[in-house]
């Protein structure tokens, strides 16, 4: 499923992740629990996005991940359009699938553990800027 045109879902869950209290890194790496969904950190979001089909919470985790990816991307896009500023990231055409973005985010998070305690939205935007940089001239999303 491509990011463009995909309706945002799980708004309350995304709110909880973005604005929730941080958990210690050790709690973010174990089994997925309710606390993983409300941790609000980059590490916890990466844990949810990296859930495997063998985990009991897989369906909830991956749908939560996709909701945060879409919601954060759409919010960033709306803010930049409203403020007339250059976007922080620019998706390629064709857009990557949500599963591709999630896998790239998990890999980026593993390669950048210094950001695991950062607020999820901030870490996700840092990832997006690194993974999908905009061209020097006014690129559009």
Image (cartoon, rainbow, N blue to C red):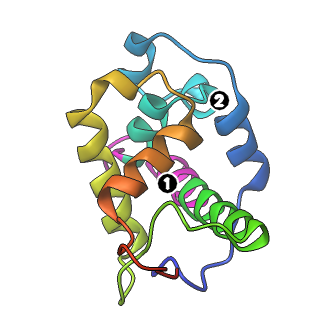
Residue occupying image coordinates x 55% and y 49%: 60
Q: Quadrant of residue 40?
A: top right
SS class, disc 1: helix
Compared to residue 132, the image places residue 5 above or below, namely below
Of residues 88 and 27, which is closer to you in this image? 88
Please state which of the two labelled residues, at mark 1 or mark 2, is closer to the viewer: 2
Residue occupying image coordinates x 35% and y 66%: 132
Disc 1 designates what residue? 59
| Residue 61 is at least partly visible in this image | yes
Residue reaching furthest to the front: 137
Residue occupying image coordinates x 67% and y 66%: 80
Numbered range of the magenta stretch: 50-67
Distance from disc 1 to disc 2, alpha carbons, whole Å, reads 16 Å
| Residue 56 is at least partly visible in this image | no
Position of residue 121 measured from the top left corner of the image (x, y, whole percent): 58, 43
Compared to residue 125, the image places residue 32 above or below, namely above
Q: Is 60 within the magenta?
A: yes
The disc at residue 38 is 2
Residue occupying image coordinates x 65% and y 29%: 38
Position of residue 7 measured from the top left corner of the image (x, y, whole percent): 68, 77
Left or right of 18 on screen, residue 4 = left
Q: Is 100 within the magenta?
A: no
Position of residue 19 measured from the top left corner of the image (x, y, whole percent): 72, 32
Compared to residue 17, the image places residue 20 above or below, namely above
């Amino acid at each position: 499923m491509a990011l463009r045109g995909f309706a945002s879902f799980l708004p309350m869950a995304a709110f909880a992740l973005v604005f929730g209290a941080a958990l210690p890194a050790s709690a973010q790496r174990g089994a997925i629990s309710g606390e993983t969904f409300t941790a609000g950190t980059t590490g916890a979001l990466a844990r949810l996005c990296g859930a495997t089909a063998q985990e009991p919470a897989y369906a909830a985790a991956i749908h939560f991940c996709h909701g945060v990816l879409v919601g954060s991307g759409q919010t960033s896009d709306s803010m930049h359009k409203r403020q007339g500023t250059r976007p922080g990231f620019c998706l390629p055409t064709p857009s990557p699938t949500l599963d591709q973005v999630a896998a790239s985010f998990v890999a980026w998070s593993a390669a950048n553990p210094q950001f695991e305690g950062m607020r999820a939205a901030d870490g996700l935007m840092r990832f997006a800027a690194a993974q999908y940089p905009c061209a020097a001239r006014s690129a559009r999303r």
